Amino acid sequence: MHPYVQLAKQTVELWVKEHKKPDEGYKDTPLFSKKSACFCTIYKKGELRGCIGTILPFYDSLYQEIIENAISAATRDPRFDPITIDELDLLEYKVDVLSDIVPVLDLKKLDPKINGIIVRQGTKQGLLLPDLEGVDSVDDQIKISKMKAGIFNSMPCDYFTFTVERFS
């Protein structure tokens, strides 16, 4: 298990059991010290159980970013009830570290297996990570991202893209 995934798992288990965060023992190691945005995704028996992340780094290190996003995925994803102690042995984790966000110049050049997408209209914004099961086209990504953002009109949107380094 990759250290990013180990940290996400350790964080969720410690938070759910004791309402504590891991110590900062690895924060300054090269692997964790870089400043990057990330998403933490939790699955239970293969089904999505929580997913929260940042599109721009909020904290000074990836270490802290993973801790905060893992806790949020476990307890604050509005689609799910908070994770309970009884579920901990059934969970699997994934951490996606995001590249820089760049404007999309040509939607036809995006690959849904490689490129994540952000759709923005005014103050509404939706994001979809790349390479998700059942999402086979950029049109699928846009449709789902708009739905997540609450964009239900045909007015113009701004599009942004990114790639991820995925760890599971």
Image: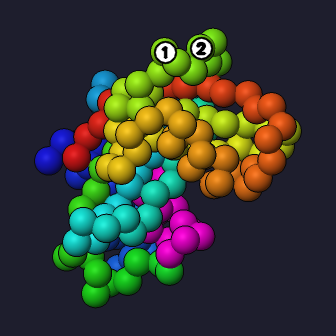
Estimate the x, y position of residue 38 in percent, counting from the top left: 46, 40
Residue 97 forms part of the magenta stretch? no
At x 28%, y 71%, the residue is 44
Please say if 163 is above or below 55: above
- Which image quadrant for residue 103? top right
Residue 70 forms part of the magenta stretch? yes
At x 83%, y 37%, the residue is 155
Q: Residue furthest bottom?
A: 86
Q: Can residue 64 be seen at all in this image of the molecule?
A: no
Q: CA distance from mark 1 to mark 2?
A: 6 Å
Q: Which residue is mark 1?
A: 109
> For the magenta stretch, what is the residue range?
67-80
Whether label 1 touches label 2, CB < 8 Å: yes
Q: How many marks?
A: 2
Q: Amino acid at mark 2?
A: Asp
For numbered disc 1, what is the local secondary structure? helix
Estimate the x, y position of residue 109 in percent, counting from the top left: 48, 15
Give the label on residue 166, or none.
none
In front here: 121 or 139? 139
Estimate the x, y position of residue 31 in percent, counting from the top left: 29, 29
Q: Which residue is mark 2?
A: 106
For numbered disc 2, what is the local secondary structure? loop
In front here: 57 or 96? 96
At x 38%, y 55%, the residue is 41
